[in-house]
């Protein structure tokens, strides 16, 4: 494993930590990596495109980009694990550039999640919550402060909406 792989592995380990300060610092680091990658790609450069990680996918191990890996991980933490609301702002800051970098993957993950949902009421509420996460408050495709604040609000509303029925599974 190379040095970059050890760093990202440490970030993943830290995101799963029970210590809120550790999680917050790791979210800040993921935000920095994802923001860098997004800005570089926006400028026509490769960003972190050459860096790949091995992840557990639904069909076994898969090689994916750093941004894909952390998008999957953050969605898993937010939806299915005991995530603390006081970290929602930092999570939003890390998630926003990941969504910009990995829009297709995000849409596919949301679609897969909705397809697995058997309860039509929950499925409908979940679909609306995901739609509002990325569509409410006139979000734009920028990482400027006003847009980040809008997304922070959207994520808090989203977490409030889905926390009641997602944690049960």
Image (cartoon, helix red, strand yellow):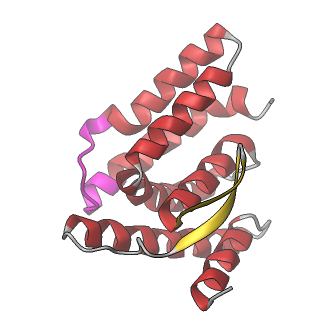
Residue 43 in picture, x, y percent from top left = 19, 70
Residue in the foreground of this view, choosing between 105 and 31: 105
**In the current view of this chain or complex, which residue is farthest to the left?**
43
Q: Specify whether residue 34 is painted magenta.
A: no
- Residue 158 appears in the figure: no
Quadrant that contains the N terminus: bottom right
Quadrant that contains the C terminus: top right
Residue 158 in picture, x, y percent from top left = 52, 36
Above or below, comparing residue 51 to residue 65 in the picture: below
Label tally: 0
Q: Specify whether residue 139 is painted magenta.
A: yes
Image position of 139 (left or right of 50): left
Above or below, comparing residue 10 to residue 86 in the picture: below
Residue 59 in picture, x, y percent from top left = 72, 44
Q: Residue at x 50, y 28 (%)?
A: 129
Image position of 131 (left or right of 146): right
Q: Residue at x 63, y 9 (%)?
A: 120
Residue 86 in picture, x, y percent from top left = 61, 56
Residue in the foreground of this view, choosing between 63 and 72: 63
Q: Which residues are magenta?
A: 137-148
> For residue 33, which quarter of the picture?
bottom left
Residue in the foreground of this view, choosing between 30 and 164: 30
- Residue 47 appears in the figure: yes
**In the current view of this chain or complex, which residue is farthest to the top?**
120
Above or below, comparing residue 83 to residue 54 in the picture: above
Q: Residue at x 48, y 31 (%)?
A: 130
């Amino acid at each position: 494993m190379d040095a970059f792989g050890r760093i990202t592995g440490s970030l993943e380990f830290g995101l799963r930590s029970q210590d809120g300060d550790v999680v917050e610092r790791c979210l800040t680091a993921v935000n920095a990596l994802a923001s860098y990658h997004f800005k570089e790609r926006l400028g026509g450069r490769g960003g972190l495109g050459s860096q790949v990680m091995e992840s557990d996918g639904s069909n076994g191990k898969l090689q994916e980009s750093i941004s894909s890996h952390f998008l999957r991980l953050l969605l898993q933490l937010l939806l299915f694990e005991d995530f603390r609301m006081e970290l929602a702002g930092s999570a939003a800051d890390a998630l926003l550039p990941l969504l910009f970098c990995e829009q297709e993957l995000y849409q596919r993950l949301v679609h897969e999640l909705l397809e697995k949902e058997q309860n039509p009421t929950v499925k409908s509420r979940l679909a609306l919550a995901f739609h509002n996460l990325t569509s409410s408050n006139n979000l734009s495709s920028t990482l400027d402060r006003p847009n980040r604040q809008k997304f922070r609000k959207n994520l808090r509303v989203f977490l409030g909406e889905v926390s009641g029925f997602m944690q049960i599974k």
